[in-house]
């Protein structure tokens, strides 16, 4: 059997950056040459864009699989994200335009955010939090979540953000694993027109003894009734009112731990990914500036990720704030009060850079383009996407309908583990191919290899590896260095195994093919989920699809497709739609990819970060019991599909 993943799709459309974008950008192709000539010198230059207390003298200390970057330097991450901009005269620049779901709004400048974080640093210290202690942040999309992360960073405490939708047992598992001593939460947040309580989840998580949490700091937002544990619970606003406004920030070593973040759990038991300070900040801020052609004086940037996921950490808090960016942040969902909400927000603030996930784009497609028409989206100049492979048709739709047919769409590949963007074009430089993540960013070295570790030829598929250490790489799995070695380094020695399948095209550019665990083997052909899904989505009636390989007596595995139809196609009889789509894939990319079954479903099982859980679909297709479903966003989706299969 071949190790290669068979390549099925072809894509010939190309999009150069608009003239004005290219000519007015501070980013140019020389970055690639500079990084190729002297990779470590290049990263040292990027790191020197930060404000250091003690400059570093050594760039990299690499003892595979452990790296230390800039390790003899010291700095304070929060000072780099806040005070530095105030000191440079930008205290009046807006840091956050915040939009509550019920329609309330707050505008917070860099000066105001700096003041908030200084006070909060004093509050944390008064609650006994010291450098190196862990703090769990269980907050929805509130400005206080940003302040909480930066206040931890300011005093050298290690935050672990837990997504606001997780259950008590999920939360408790993370509190215990991290050994948190403080939890920061809220009474409740607004979502889909209702207040959803968070504090009761914390109470429930802490009910059984055996944890190390001494205080719970509670932000008032939902104004819902909550229980109160005297001596343990502290109102945020009361503690802030009592706190000293001034706070002198201490510098910490470059490798001081910054945060632990548990991966989204698309594939199983969550891992506590540990990130440290300076290298992480250098790569997040570098990529944020150059991938999106950021102009901090004039751009208004909106990343729609939740703060509880890595994208919220790297591309709402650390990268953008280190760059002094003006951002939009929103509470709640895109469709409440109406599906026009995202487009109205873009118009209201004149958003210029918009960064979202394929799952959101496919939902916009499913709802139809008419929702975008009532708003003026002409301020947008760069779009971005992250989280899953973006199908070429969704890419084109995004560019045409949201971007007015002119904006570059930056498909950015990276992971919780990589900390920052690894593969992407640069908005003002790259001629883009819809569906390709393009090339490693300057200073990053990546290859696609077969099972034996040999590079595949251009045109072939294989496994994605990072061939040299990078500044924002994870340093270990918290409390489990053995699992760190096994998961990422055992397979290819000192090369990092990402767990994703990829293909280099004829130009050496990279296409992500989905997770290695999801690759199908049909009659000896290794087929990628991403390619067959892209073919399905290219059909005019299809909004979204997920493809899995189910055990098959004759072919080993057979392709089983789950498809959501667009609202405009929903009237077709199911049998007819299934037949048309099987035929469509067979004629589009070949008989080998023809699905044994196509199921028309109302929805797909997704993680809370919006990724399709193919593992569950495989279980469903094979009639097995479902494994761990705790990270599933909506349990009822599975039941709906199950009833369809019977
Ligand atoms: P877990 O590791 O717990 O299973 P997860 O992998 O979903 O969860 P993340 O770190 O949030 O957790 O996601 C990283 C993964 O998302 C990548 O390994 C890849 O599979 C996918 N991904 C992210 N961005 C892209 C992209 N631009 N193109 C294709 N796939 C992407
Ligand atoms: Mg992963």
Image: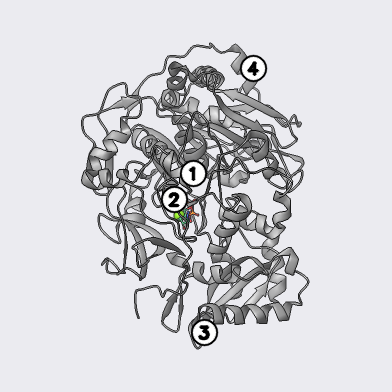
The C terminus appears in which quarter of the rendering? bottom right
Residue 233 visible, this angle: no
Q: Is mark 2 within 8 Å of ligand 1?
A: yes
The residue sitting at 31% across, 43% down in the picture is: 31
Q: Earlier in the sequence, mark 3 or mark 1?
A: 1
The relative height of residue 416 versus residue 640 in the rendered view (above or below) is above
Q: Which residue is mark 4?
A: 238
Real-space CA distance between mark 4 and mark 2, rounded to the nearest whole angstrom: 38 Å
The relative height of residue 416 versus residue 436 in the rendered view (above or below) is above
Q: Is mark 1 within 8 Å of ligand 1?
A: yes
Q: Which residue is mark 2?
A: 415
Q: Residues within 10 Å of mark 3 (few under 14, many from 20)?
A: few
- Percent position (x, y) of residue 76? 38, 24
Front tag of 3 and 4 = 3
Q: Earlier in the sequence, mark 4 or mark 2?
A: 4
Real-space CA distance between mark 2 and mark 1, rounded to the nearest whole angstrom: 8 Å
- Percent position (x, y) of residue 116? 55, 20
Q: Nearer the viewer, residue 294 or 220?
A: 294
Q: Residues within 10 Å of mark 2 (few under 14, many from 20)?
A: some
Report if the CB atoms under discs 2 and 1 are less than 8 Å apart: yes
- Identify the secondary structure beneath mark 4: helix
Q: Which residue is mark 1?
A: 310
Q: Mark number for residue 591? A: 3
- Percent position (x, y) of residue 296? 48, 31
Real-space CA distance between mark 3 and mark 2, rounded to the nearest whole angstrom: 33 Å
């Amino acid at each position: 059997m071949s190790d290669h993943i068979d390549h099925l799709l072809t894509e010939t459309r190309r999009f150069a950056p608009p003239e004005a974008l290219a000519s007015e950008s501070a980013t140019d192709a020389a970055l690639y040459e500079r990084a190729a000539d002297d990779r470590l010198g290049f990263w040292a230059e990027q790191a020197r864009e930060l404000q250091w207390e003690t400059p570093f003298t050594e760039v990299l200390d690499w003892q595979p699989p452990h790296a230390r970057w800039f390790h003899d330097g010291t700095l304070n991450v929060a000072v780099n994200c806040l005070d530095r901009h105030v000191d440079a005269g930008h205290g009046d620049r807006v840091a956050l335009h915040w939009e509550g779901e019920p329609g309330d709004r707050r505008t917070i400048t860099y000066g105001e955010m700096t003041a908030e974080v200084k006070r909060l640093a004093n509050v944390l210290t008064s609650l006994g939090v010291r450098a190196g202690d862990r703090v769990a942040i269980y907050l929805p999309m509130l400005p206080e979540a940003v302040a909480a992360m930066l206040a931890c960073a300011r005093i050298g405490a290690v935050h672990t953000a837990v997504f606001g939708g997780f259950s008590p047992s999920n939360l408790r598992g993370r509190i215990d694993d991290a050994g948190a001593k403080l939890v920061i939460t809220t009474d409740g947040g607004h979502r889909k027109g209702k207040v959803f309580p968070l504090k009761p989840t914390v109470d429930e998580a802490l009910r059984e003894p055996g944890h190390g949490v001494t205080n719970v700091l509670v932000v008032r937002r939902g104004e819902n009734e909550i229980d109160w544990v005297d001596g343990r619970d502290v109102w945020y606003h009361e503690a802030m009112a009592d706190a000293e406004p001034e706070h002198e920030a201490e510098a910490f070593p470059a490798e001081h731990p910054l945060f632990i973040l548990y991966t989204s759990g698309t594939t199983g038991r969550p891992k506590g990914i540990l990130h440290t300070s300076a290298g992480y900040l250098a790569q997040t801020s570098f990529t944020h500036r150059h991938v999106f052609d950021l102009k901090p004086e004039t751009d208004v940037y909106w990343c729609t990720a939740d703060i509880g996921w890595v994208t919220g950490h790297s591309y709402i808090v650390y990268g953008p704030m280190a760059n002094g960016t003006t951002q939009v942040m929103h509470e709640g969902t895109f469709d409440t009060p109406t599906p026009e909400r995202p487009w109205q927000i873009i118009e209201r603030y004149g958003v210029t850079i918009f960064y979202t996930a394929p799952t959101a784009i496919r939902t916009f497609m499913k709802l139809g383009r008419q929702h975008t028409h009532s708003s003026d989206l002409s301020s947008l100049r760069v779009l971005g996407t992250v989280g899953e492979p973006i199908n070429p048709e969704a890419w084109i739709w995004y560019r045409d309908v949201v971007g007015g047919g002119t904006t570059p769409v930056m498909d950015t590949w990276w992971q919780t583990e990589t900390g920052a963007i690894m593969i992407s074009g640069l908005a003002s430089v790259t001629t883009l191919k819809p569906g390709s993540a393009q090339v490693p960013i300057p200073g990053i070295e990546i290859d696609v290899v077969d099972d034996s570790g040999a590079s595949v030829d251009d045109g072939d598929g294989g496994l994605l590896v990072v061939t040299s250490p990078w500044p924002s790489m994870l340093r270990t799995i918290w409390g489990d260095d053995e699992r760190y070695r096994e998961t990422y380094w055992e397979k290819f020695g000192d090369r990092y195994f990402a767990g994703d399948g990829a293909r280099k095209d004829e130009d050496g550019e990279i296409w992500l093919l989905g997770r290695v665990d999801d690759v199908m083997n049909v009659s000896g052909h290794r087929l990628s989920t991403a390619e067959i899904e892209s073919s399905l989505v290219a059909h005019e009636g299809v909004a979204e699809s997920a493809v899995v390989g189910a055990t098959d007596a004759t072919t080993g595995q057979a392709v089983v497709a789950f498809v959501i139809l667009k609202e405009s196609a929903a009237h077709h009889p199911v049998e007819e739609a299934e037949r048309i789509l099987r035929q469509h894939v067979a004629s589009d990319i070949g008989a080998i990819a023809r699905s044994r079954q196509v199921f028309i479903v109302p929805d797909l099982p997704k993680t809370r970060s919006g990724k399709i859980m193919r593992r569950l679909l495989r279980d469903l297709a094979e009639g097995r019991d479902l494994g761990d479903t705790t990270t599933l966003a909506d349990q009822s989706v599975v039941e709906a599909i199950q009833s369809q299969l019977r």
